[in-house]
Amino acid sequence: MPTSIPLGAPVWVDANTPDLAAEVAFYTRLFGWTTFDSGEEFGHYTEFCLGSSVASARAVAGMAPNQSDQPDKPAGWGVSFHVRDCVSAAAEAEKLGAATITSPMRVGDDLVFAGMRDPDGGTFGLYEPLREDMGFMAYGEPGAAAWFEYVYNGVPAEAMQFYAELLDWSVVEAVSEDPDELAPPVELRTRESGFEFGVCRAAADPTAPQWIVCFAVGSVDRVAASAVGAGGSVAVPPGDEAGMRTATLASPTGAMFGVVSEAV
């Protein structure tokens, strides 16, 4: 495998936006990211990195402007999972009830990608890296992706069976504060390596199933306040749960994302 990221684990996150300049300004202010524009040939796909120079830059996320045929597509973050063979994985996903949004396509000599919609309606990507320096170059540290939550208006254990079969996950029912909870959250791990990367929880209100990308920060409260000052908003205020302090924020164009740190 070109990357050390375990098979089945999140390997990359990126977002689409109707206003690339505004979103780049927002996130660079919030996380101190350095940006690298891929140019017109690649649709000005912009890579966010930790580090101030090309030599020291470590990629953490990407962003693409909306395509000309979908100028008003809502902004949003997405997560892609590491697979050995994108074409085979996409075919297997369809057999398990998923729909293909973007057929497997090779991106230069870098990767093969497919965009999918799971049986409940949540979107995700399948990502086959072709080089060692593809995918996350930093993970779990301030400014980098660190946690992933699937929010679902239903029973989490049922929603995650699709991913467990497709990506060989271990889905473990989490300890709930309410022993009578009918839809307790489930912890998500890659089965072979035991790498824990996220959770699926039942939504408090009816909502479309979706993955929430969470970035590590030094202070959730400070970053939440900074997001508002930079033109964003707070969807879920800071709070402590399961040893983590979390908040859900929205960018100026409405892309939802989370921030996490150790509980205070």
Image: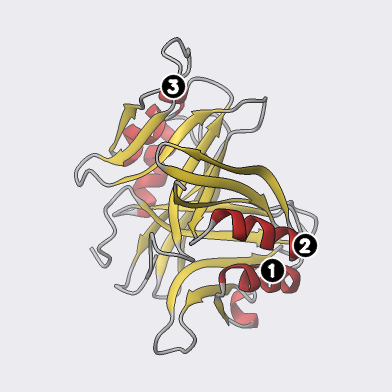
Q: Name the mark on residue 26.
A: 1
Residue under circle 2?
231
Q: How is the image coloured?
A: secondary structure
Q: CA distance from mark 2 to mark 3?
A: 35 Å
Q: Secondary structure at mark 2?
A: loop
Residue under circle 3?
177
Could you classify mark 1 by the number of other residues whose Cα lies within 10 Å: few (under 14), some (14-19), or many (20 or more)? many
**Badge 2 amino acid:** Gly
Q: Is residue 123 left or right of residue 144?
A: right
Indicate the position of residue 182 as horizontal and vertical percent values. 48, 12
Furthest toward the front, the residue is 264
Mark 2 and mark 3 lie on one chain; the one further toward the N terminus is 3
Q: Determine the residue positioned at 38% across, 68% down.
A: 138
Q: Image quadrant of residue 94?
A: top left
**Badge 3 amino acid:** Glu
Indicate the position of residue 207 as horizontal and vertical percent values. 66, 30
User: How many marks on residues?
Assistant: 3
Q: Is residue 176 left or right of residue 211?
A: left
In this rendered view, identify the residue nearer to me: 209 or 195.
Answer: 195
Mark 1 and mark 3 lie on one chain; the one further toward the N terminus is 1
Q: Do the residues under discs 1 and 2 have CB atoms within 8 angstroms?
A: yes
Q: Determine the residue positioned at 64% across, 76% down.
A: 44
Residue 219, visible in the rendered structure: yes
Q: Do the residues under discs 1 and 3 have CB atoms within 8 angstroms?
A: no
Q: Secondary structure at mark 1?
A: helix
Q: CA distance from mark 1 to mark 3?
A: 36 Å
Mark 1 and mark 2 lie on one chain; the one further toward the N terminus is 1
Vertical relation: 199 (above or below) 52: above
